Amino acid sequence: MTALPPRFAITPEEIDRVVAEFYACIREHPGLGPVFAAHVTDWPAHEAKIARFWRNAILFERSYDGNPLEVHRRAGNVRPGMFDIWLGLFDAVLRRQLAPDTAAAWSTLAHRIGRGLRYGVVPDTALPGGVPKLR
């Protein structure tokens, strides 16, 4: 089987740079920092794992073997409304670190993944009419 071409042009080093800056921003964020700090005790290991996630999602490297949805569900303190903040910080890092076309392509992928995670952490409760409660 031949390797799939990357979703868009980016290097592993660029992915590492984005992930490192993003988590530096997360650690400083007054709302998200404590959420992550409750679960991440080894930041270099976490960043390496997330970089593998993105290499898998973008470059199809097959070096990531986690289940992000299950991790976010089990965390117990991740709420759907947090994803908008997360994505806003991520987009800002992408714009600082990458060429505009690459930043836009990665942002589109991140927002698609974020939507799935957001819906996946919605509590079993719903608003009247079965509408998911997203905040």
Image: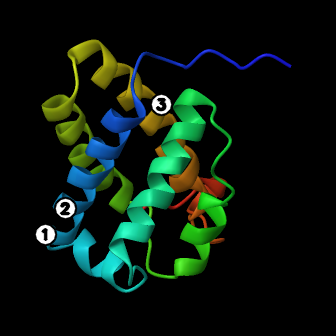
> Camera-side residue: 56 or 38?
56
How many callouts does the rendering have?
3
- Cβ atoms under marks 1 and 2 closer than 8 Å: yes
Q: How many angstroms separate mark 3 from mark 1 (CA)?
A: 24 Å
| Display coloring | rainbow
> Camera-side residue: 33 or 13?
13
- Cβ atoms under marks 2 and 3 closer than 8 Å: no
What kind of element bears circle 1? helix
Q: Earlier in the sequence, mark 3 or mark 1?
A: 1
Considering only vertical position in the picture, is 62 above or below 49? above
Considering only vertical position in the picture, is 97 above or below 105? below
What kind of element bears circle 3? helix
The residue pinned by badge 2 equals 24
Question: What is the three-letter code of the residue carrying label 1?
Answer: Glu
In the displayed structure, does residue 58 sit left or right of residue 64? left
Q: How many angstroms separate mark 2 from mark 3 (CA)?
A: 21 Å
The residue pinned by badge 3 equals 109
Residue at 22% across, 16% down: 100
Q: What x and y, as percent, mark residue 76?
A: 52, 82
The residue pinned by badge 1 equals 28
Within the image, what quadrant is residue 122 found in? bottom right
